Image (cartoon, helix red, strand yellow):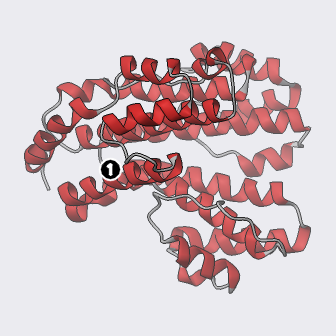
């Protein structure tokens, strides 16, 4: 499929972009008196129905996005797998831990992946990871055996988190779309940074970090490892000389502040797609915009539900695409 073959799909996306939630609407949600008022505002925008729970509304809105992409892209929807495979690895992690635990926990799986949750659960419960796609099967088996042998949940997470980043990188390259490749690079680099910071704070040794980090173009694995062995200040000092220099202050504040910076960087990088009429870029950008607004709405509703001050919630809110 050539770029011109996406012209109709892009035209459809253009008709949907005005329905994206704007910064002014997010401000309305932020200043709503409680979660109930926010839900009513969302209902008025066509999100869910009166009386529907927040989780159901968010799940429905996510499904709408992927139903639209399936309609517009058909067999080429695999180009967008880079945005979905992380959910697959989240579910694989949850399934492996659930299978190894006597106490079953509800609500640990997420929607929006490429592999059915039921299949992932069956693979973990039956220790038959051949049921899964090749990019999940070997690492799933290795992580499960590691957890059963060592009982170390963090080590299991380490193996699967790295595999998720590797799959994001590979899916980004396979997409053939520069915007998607750039997104994948940002996700891998920011993932490396978060792993290095967490490992540093937890006192993990170099061998653990060596196993957890992966190579990427914009952040040197070797230099990040060296810095993490010294401490957070050394990590920040190294990052001052990379494309992530503007994130350093946020990283010093907290992990959530750094994640917010990363999400905002993605939105800033995809805005040129609003003026692009060819190729899959505008569709990919629309997916990211929708995922971003879902995350922001979830943050606001959760904060209001838990009685957090407006300013605390505001500090976590992401930029909007439109």
Q: Residue at x 50, y 22 (%)?
A: 32
In-front residue for pair 123/108: 108
At 55% from the left and 33% from the top, the residue drawn is: 35
Residue 56 seen in render: yes
Residue 261, picture quadrant: top right
The residue shown at (26%, 24%) is: 272
Work out whether 274 lies above or below 16.
above
Q: Where is residue 17 drawn, in percent x and y?
A: 23, 33
> Which of these two is toward me, 42 or 190?
42
On the question of residue 178 being in view, the answer is no
Q: Is residue 176 left or right of residue 190?
A: left
Instruction: Indicate left or right for 312 with 202 as reference.
Output: left
- Residue 64, position in %: x, y? 32, 53
Residue 251: x percent and y percent? 69, 21
* Place of residue 258 in the rendered image (x, y in percent of width and height, measured from the top left): 64, 25
Disc tally is 1
Residue sitting at x 77%, y 32%: 197
Above or below, 201 against 27 in this view is below
Location of mark 1 (residue): 65
The front one of 247 and 37 is 37
In this rendering, would 133 be left or right of 143? Answer: left
Q: Quadrant of the N terminus?
A: bottom left
Check disc 1 and report its element: helix, strand or loop.
helix
181 is higher (above) or lower (below) than 220: below
Neighbours of disc 1 within 10 Å: few (<14), some (14-19), many (20+): some
> Which quadrant is home to the C terminus?
top left
- Quadrant assignment, res 269: top left
């Amino acid at each position: 499929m050539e770029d011109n073959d996406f012209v109709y799909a892009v035209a459809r996306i253009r008709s949907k972009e005005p329905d994206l939630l704007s910064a002014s609407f997010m401000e309305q949600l932020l200043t709503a008196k409680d979660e109930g008022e926010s839900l009513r505002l969302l209902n008025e925008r066509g999100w869910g129905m009166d009386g529907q729970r927040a989780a159901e509304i968010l799940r429905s809105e996510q499904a709408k996005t992927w139903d639209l992409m399936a309609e517009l892209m058909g067999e080429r929807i695999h180009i967008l797998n880079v945005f979905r495979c992380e959910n697959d690895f989240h579910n694989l992690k949850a399934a492996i831990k659930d299978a190894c635990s006597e106490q079953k926990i509800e609500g640990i799986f997420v929607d929006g992946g490429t592999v059915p949750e039921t299949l992932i659960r069956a693979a973990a419960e039956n220790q038959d990871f051949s049921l899964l796609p090749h990019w999940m099967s070997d690492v799933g088996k290795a992580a499960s055996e590691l957890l059963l042998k060592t009982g170390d949940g963090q080590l299991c997470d380490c193996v699967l988190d790295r595999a998720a980043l590797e799959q994001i990188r590979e899916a980004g390259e396979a997409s053939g779309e520069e915007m998607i490749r750039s997104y994948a690079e940002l996700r891998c680099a920011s993932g490396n940074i978060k792993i290095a910071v967490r490992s540093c704070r937890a006192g993990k040794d170099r061998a653990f970090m060596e196993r957890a980090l992966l190579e990427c173009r914009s952040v040197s694995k070797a230099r990040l490892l060296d810095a993490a062995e010294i401490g957070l200040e050394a990590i920040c000092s190294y990052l001052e000389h990379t494309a992530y220099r503007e994130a350093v202050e946020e990283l010093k504040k907290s992990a959530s502040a750094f994640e917010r910076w990363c999400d905002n960087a993605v939105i800033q990088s995809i805005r040129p797609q609003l003026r692009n009429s060819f190729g899959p870029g505008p569709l990919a950008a629309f997916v990211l915009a929708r995922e971003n607004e879902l995350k922001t709405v979830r943050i606001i509703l959760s904060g209001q539900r838990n009685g957090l001050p407006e300013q605390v919630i505001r500090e976590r809110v992401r930029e909007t695409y439109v």
